[in-house]
Amino acid sequence: MTDKDGFISVVHEKANLSARAEPVSVEFKQGIPMPSGAGAGSDGITQALFDQVSIVRVLKVAHKADITVPAVMSGPSTALHVLEAFPEYPSELKRNRTGKERARAAITAFKREGRLVVDTFKTPSRNTRERLVLTELADLLCDSA
């Protein structure tokens, strides 16, 4: 990464098996580094925003069905495992590793922005667990998209 006149660019320094890639300019949007020029054009929304809206919709369905979405992101019972069971969950997010990474990124972005909070609760057997709970900000995002 190089910094020139306040602009950050990612430069491909070494390539053993291929030609060097062109430098990519990076700008920060809400604290997240994004390639310059990437994002919503006049005719659509970004892929990240689409993923976030999709996750919010599925979380709302889970909440209405009174299904607990665990806060853990690894292991046998994760938030993604619970959300994937709903028909509203987008098929492109469960196809392969890239889709699952996009879903994890959307959930992580929500947590950082405060739109999704981790709530501690007691199970009927008095064990302590953590679950994901939507805040009002997430509802506004879903309604505006």
Image (cartoon, rainbow, N blue to C red):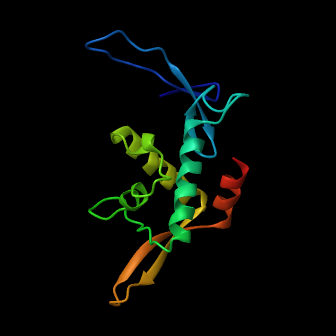
Q: Which quarter of the figure has residue 128?
A: bottom left
- Name above or below for residue 10 compared with residue 67: above
Q: Name above or below for residue 81 compared with residue 37.
A: below
Determine the residue located farthest toward the top in the rendered image.
Answer: 19
- Which residue is painted at 45% across and 21% down in the image? 11
Residue at point 56%, 34% (across, down): 34
Query: On the rendered structure, is 71 left or right of 40?
Result: left
Could you say where residue 129 lies in the image, as x and y percent from the top left?
Answer: 38, 78
Q: Position of residue 15 (x, y in %)?
A: 31, 15
Q: Quadrant of residue 82?
A: bottom left
Q: Nearer the viewer, residue 29 or 54?
A: 54
Identity of the residue drawn at 69% across and 28% down: 41
User: To which quarter of the image does residue 124 belong?
Assistant: bottom left
Residue sticking out furthest to the front: 87
Picture coordinates of residue 2, whole percent (x, y)? 51, 26
Q: Position of residue 64 (x, y in %)?
A: 56, 70
Which of 51 and 8 lies nearest the eye of the viewer? 51
Most foreground residue, 111 or 65: 65
Left or right position of 21 against 44: left
- Residue at the (51%, 71%) spot, across then down: 65
The correct choice, above or below, for 87 with respect to 76 in the image is above
Left-right relation of 44 to 48: right
**Number of marks:** 0
